[in-house]
Amino acid sequence: MRRSTGSGVSRRALLAGGAAAVSAAVLAGCQGAGWYPAEISPDEYVLRGAITEKQRLIARYEAAIEGGDAPGDLLAKLLGHHEEHLKALRDRLPEDSGGRDPAPTSTTGPSPEPVSDDPLSVAALQVAEETAAGMRGRDAAKVADRSLAQLLVSVGACEVGHAHLLSQA
């Protein structure tokens, strides 16, 4: 049972042509990172978020060490690792950004909650490490630069190791 639209074009051909036109319109919008309408690239946005999160984790460790109720040697060692991670992440910032810290603006995301001066317990630091490790994996999936993804995953793997060490403390 073949029906015609009256102009000699089959319904199947009309639907296929419509689908092709819609596909072409959708694909025309996929131009990669060049379309991003912000002052920073999507990769830099993710990188700046990771830097902010790393700064918060460092502040938590510093508060825990100052509190004195946790194993200070272990926390100092892990704090040193986080400071190395922060340096490696900052080194990946584009040169035109001047290595500036991520500022809470509308282009870099919402301002994070301030870190409490109250020291965290070892268990709370373990949860913070586990959460950070999960975030690094999600961050790595968002970036286009493979070497940045590798750095983020490496930092996340180290954070998993930290969580394990804290669980043994």
Image (spheres, grey):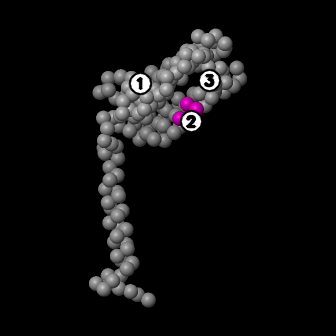
Q: Are marks 1 and 3 in contact (CB under 8 Å)?
A: no
Secondary structure beneath dot 3 equals helix
Q: Residue furthest bottom?
A: 1
Report the magenta residues as a range: 131-135
How crowded pointer 2 is (Cα within 10 Å; few <14, some 14-19, many 20+) is rated as: some
Instruction: Give, as a three-letter code, the residue at label 1.
Output: Arg
Spot occupied by residue 82 in the image (x, y as percentages of width and height): 53, 21
Left or right: 113 in relation to 98 = right
The residue under label 3 is: 125
At x 65% / y 20%, what residue is drawn?
A: 121
The residue under label 1 is: 90
The residue under label 2 is: 134
Left or right: 20 in relation to 119 = left
Give the mark nearer the N terminus: 2 vs 1. 1
Quadrant (top left, top right, bottom left, bottom right) of the C terminus: top right
Q: Are marks 2 and 3 in contact (CB under 8 Å)?
A: no
In the image, residue 65 sits, relative to residue 107, either above or below, namely above
> Between tags 1 and 3, which lies in front?
3
Instruction: Give, as a three-letter code, the residue at label 3.
Output: Leu
In the image, residue 56 sits, relative to residue 70, either above or below, namely below
Spot occupied by residue 107 in the image (x, y as percentages of width and height): 35, 34
Query: In front: 59, or 152?
Result: 59
Instruction: Give, as a three-letter code, the residue at label 2.
Output: Gly
The span from disc 2 to disc 3 (Cα, nearest Å) is: 14 Å
In the image, residue 46 sits, relative to residue 24, either above or below, namely above
At x 52% / y 21%, what residue is drawn?
A: 115
Main secondary structure along the magenta-highlighted residues? helix
